[in-house]
Image (spheres, rainbow, N blue to C red):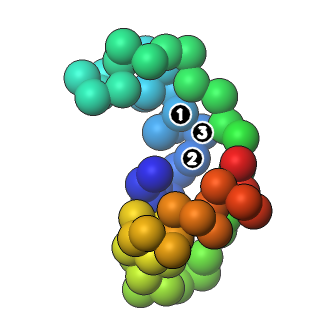
Amino acid sequence: MGMTADLRRRLQEHNAGKSSHTAKLRPWRLETYIAFSDRTRAEAFERYLKSGSGHAFASKRLW
């Protein structure tokens, strides 16, 4: 999970191996994305998804 203003660029970077944390899991493909017009709400939603109830929600509803 993460945030970006340029989703295509971010995916290309992951697949090019530019992140040592994600390079070994290539190739990446986009399964779900959620867009927010407000960065504050996007950050709050990402924090929620990393919580216990957020993990359960994501597993059931997003992927």
Cα distance in 3D space between marks 1 and 3: 5 Å
Q: Nearer the viewer, residue 13 or 45?
A: 45
Q: Mark 3 = which residue?
A: 8
Q: Are marks 1 and 3 in contact (CB under 8 Å)?
A: yes
Image position, residue 29 (x, y; %): 65, 28
Q: Is residue 32 above or below residue 48?
A: above
Q: Are marks 1 and 2 in contact (CB under 8 Å)?
A: yes
- Disc marking residue 11: 1
Residue flagged by tag 2: what amino acid is it? Leu
Cα distance in 3D space between marks 2 and 3: 4 Å
Q: Residue at x 45, y 76 (%)?
A: 48
Residue flagged by tag 1: what amino acid is it? Leu
Image position, residue 37 (x, y; %): 60, 81
Q: Quadrant of residue 18?
A: top left
**Does residue 49 appear in this view?**
yes
Cα distance in 3D space between marks 1 and 2: 6 Å
